[in-house]
Amino acid sequence: MDCQKLAERLLPGNYPKLSYYEEIYPPRAIEKNAEVTRLAPSPTGFIHLGNLFVAIANERIAHQSGGVMYLRIEDTDDKRRVEGAVEAVKNALRYFSVRFDEGAEIDGDNTYAPWYQRQRAEIYRAFVKDLIVRGKAYPCFCTEEELSALRDEQTNEKKITGYYGEYARCRNLTEAEIFRNLDAGKPFVIRLKSAGNPENKITFRDEIKGEITVTENDQDVVILKSDGIPTYHFAHAIDDHFMRTTLVIRGEEWLSSLPIHIELFSVLGFDRPRYGHNCSLMKQDGETRRKLSKRKDPELSLEFYRQEGYFPRAVRVYMMTLLNSNFEEWYQKNPEKPLEEFPFSVKKMGKSGALFDLDKLNDISKNELSRLTAEETFDFLKAWADEYGSDEEKGYFKNREYLIKILELVMGTNGKKRRKDIMTARQAMEIVGYFFSKGERQDEYRTDKQTKVRILNAFLATYDYNDDAQVWFSKLKEVAASLGFAAEMRDYKANPEAYKGNVSDVAEVLRIAVTGRANTPDLWTVMQILGAEETKKRIQGETV
Ligand code: GLU
C-alpha cells in the first residue's frame, strides 16, 4: 500500500509540517506547578449543573495554582449546535463567578486560539493525514446500514459491538479497492488502525479516583467524519495537547473513553495531560439514587437557578460543599472569608456519586441571603426582577426606601438575630407582595363571620397610627376582652372553656384582614409600613 499516495488522495493539498503547530502553540510560560485547565462544553444550548460542578473545580485548581482556565467550544457535532449557545454558557458561568482567562468570546490571550473546534479543522486534518501516511489510519466506506447489521450480528453472537479486529472490514481493503471506492465517489470516514489488545490492561492514575485499571483499546474508532470534521476523541487529543492543558477534570461518563484517548495520545506522540474523572451528581429518588436527569429534574438546568432567583453564591457554596469534603467545616469557621481563600484540593474530591439535595441548597440559600443587608438584598432582587419578574413585581422596586423598610422587617435588621425566610428572589416576591397589593386571601379565617366583623370594627374604633407597639397591643387586648376572648394567655390556659379564644386568635383575624395571610412578621410594623389609610381601607374591606 502506498500510504503517501492514499493520504494525498484522501486529504489533498499542502498541510503545514506538524512541527509548525508545536511552534505556534508552544508550551506555556507558566510556573512549574501551575495548572492549565478548561471547560469544553458542546454548544447545545443546555448548560447544566454538571457543567458548573466541573467548571468550579477546574477554575479553582487553575487559579489557585497560578495557572490558566480557558473555554473551548466543542462544536464538532453540527446537528446539536444551537444559536446563541456560547453566549448562554458564558452568561451562566459568569453568573456563578466562574472566571475564564482565555477562550471562546473571552477577552484574553489568544495564542492558543481558535477556540471553536470547527475553526481548527485544518490542524486535525494535518494530523490525520500524517497518521494515514504512517499507516496508522485508514478510510472506511461502511454505510450506516452495514454498521447496524454488524452490530446486530455481534449482539447475536454475544460479542462486543464495534469496529475492531476481524470485524473491521475496511482495514483490509486493498489499494485497488480503496481507489475504486473513491473513484465511485463513495463517502468515507477515517478510522484509527488500533494497535491495542483487549487482553492487555493498563493501570492508570486518575487524579480523583486514584489507581484504576482499564482495558487497552482495540476499537478502530472514527477520527475524522465524512464531512472532514473530527470526532470528539480526536479533537480532544489534539486540542488538549496544543492548548497545553495540564489537567483534564471532566465528568466520569468519559472514563469509558479513556482507553481510546490513551491510544490516541500515544499514536500522536503527545504527552498526556493528567486526568481527574469527577463523580456525577445524583438524586435520591425514593429508595434509589440515580443521576440527575434532563427530562425529570428541572434543577439540572442552570437556567432553573436563575429563573427561580437563587443567590449565586449559595449555589457556589453548595457546589463547593459537594466538591471538597472539608469545605463545609472550613466555611463554618470562615463564613466571612471570600470563597477563593478555601484551599481547594483535587485529593478531597469525591470518588463516587455526590448526592444533590435541593432542600440542602435551599437552606444554604436562606442562610446566605440572611447575611445580606436590606440594601444588598434590594439590589439582588431587583436584578432578578428586571429579568424574570412580572410587571407587577417590577413595580415593587420603584420606591427604594419603601421596599428597604419591608426587607428590614422581613429579614430582621442587621446585628439582631436575622430571620431566614427568603430563599430565592421569586419566593421573596411572594413574601413582600402584600405590601403592594392585598391580592388574593391565602388563609381562611378561623372565626365565624359575625365575630370577625365585630373584631375588625372594634379594632378600627380604637386604631391610631401613632400608637407605639405597646399601646397598640394593649388596645388589641381590650378588643379581645370586650368580645369574650382572653386578653392574657395564662387566663386562657387556666380556663379555656370560659372564653371564645384568646388574644392571638383576635390578632390572627386582624392579620388576615390586613395581609391575607395567617403568618407574617410583626403586625404592628406591617401596619406602620402600610400606613394608616391603607391599613384602614383593608380592614374596612373585610367588614362587609
Ligand atoms: N464536550 C464534552 C462535553 O460536553 C467535553 C468533555 C471533556 O471535558 O473532555 O461533555
Image (spheres, grey):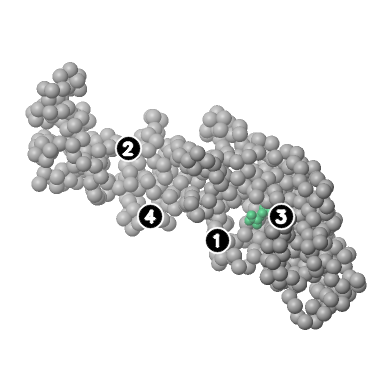
Residue 539, given in percent of the width and then of the height, sits at 15, 43
Figure check: 323 above or below 187: above
> SS of the residue at dot 3?
loop
Residue visible at 23% across and 35% down? Answer: 524
The disc at residue 389 is: 4
Q: Earlier in the sequence, mark 3 or mark 2?
A: 3
The residue singled out by tag 3 in the image is 158
The residue singled out by tag 2 in the image is 409
Cβ atoms under marks 4 and 1 closer than 8 Å: no
Residue visible at 66% across and 60% down? Answer: 74
**Res. 128 visible in picture:** no
Residue type, mark 3 in image: Lys
Q: Nearer the viewer, residue 197 or 396?
A: 197
Q: Earlier in the sequence, mark 1 or mark 2?
A: 1
Tell which tag, 4 or 3, sits nearer the viewer. 3
Q: Residues within 10 Å of mark 2 (few under 14, many from 20)?
A: many
The residue singled out by tag 1 in the image is 45
Tell which tag, 1 or 3, sits nearer the viewer. 3
Q: Nearer the viewer, residue 342 or 467?
A: 342
Residue type, mark 4 in image: Gly
Mark 1 → mark 2, Cα distance in angstroms:
40 Å
Mark 4 → mark 1, Cα distance in angstroms:
23 Å
Residue type, mark 1 in image: Gly
Residue visible at 41% across and 56% down? Answer: 388
Left or right: residue 114 versus residue 431 is right
Q: Earlier in the sequence, mark 1 or mark 3?
A: 1
Residue type, mark 2 in image: Leu
Left or right: residue 164 versus residue 513 is right
